[in-house]
Image (cartoon, rainbow, N blue to C red):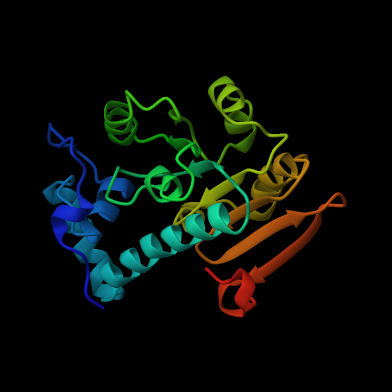
Amino acid sequence: MDSPKASEASSAAPLSDQPAQASIARVYDAALGGTDNFPIDRQVLEQVRKVAPEVNDLAWSNRRFLGRAVRFLTDQGGIHQFLDCGSGLPTAENTHQIARRIDPAARVVYIDNDPAVVAQSEALLADDELCRVVDADIFQPARVLGSKTIRSHLDFSRPLALLQVGTLHHYVGDDGAELMRQYIDALGAARDASAVVDSSCCWASTGRRGRAHTQRRRTLPSRRRF
């Protein structure tokens, strides 16, 4: 699989100051061919490559899945507001850019607790009234869902998509299902359809009874395929 040019994967705000430790967000950026990473991050990527030689293809596959999911939800799902958890460093084709090709009024909140991610995202989105950046740990759903910024920017009584793309495999606890259930329960209060999407499955509640459908990506019927 050919990957896009490195310049297409990097953000407009270069990093500064050599860090003492690698960052998940910067390692992912390196895997995408970006430039917002340091030698220590590339060293970690090389270590990953020894056990997963296809790591770059996996990173791009993950990123392209995000694009397909957001386009599907905006165009066919009637969802125009997104809570992007663990958004990572800004790259080409961010959630708001994808959604706004279909709906220019789409609203997005990006969540991350990496200081570099938060700083760059805030700088790039400073003039964007429809986007917000929240510094929070996505593995503490109660704090995320209680954020005043999130609650004021997104309407939880209307269809809303929660994105967990390339994040859950970083969670080391044994209660991942309960963690996601807290997010799902919050979205289940919506009047219409809401969705939770990660890199491996999609949960959606539709209709007044909020029926749940949980399916693996590879078995999604064609009308739901991303």
Image location (x, y in percent) of residue 179: 65, 47
The total of numbered circles placed on residues is 0
Image location (x, y in percent) of residue 44: 23, 57
Pick the front one: 87 or 37: 87
Whether residue 108 sits left or right of residue 1 in the image: it is: right
Whether residue 103 sits left or right of residue 196 in the image: it is: left
Q: Residue at x 21, y 65 (%)?
A: 4
Pick the front one: 143 or 128: 128
Image location (x, y in percent) of residue 157: 73, 34
Whether residue 61 sits left or right of residue 162 in the image: it is: left
Name above or below for residue 147 compared with residue 68. above
Whether residue 178 sits left or right of residue 104 in the image: it is: right
Q: Residue at x 63, y 50 (%)?
A: 78
**Quarter of image, res 58:** bottom left
Name above or below for residue 190 compared with residue 198. above
Q: Residue at x 63, y 72 (%)?
A: 223
Image location (x, y in percent) of residue 134: 45, 28
Pick the front one: 192 or 142: 192
Q: Residue at x 26, y 78 (%)?
A: 1
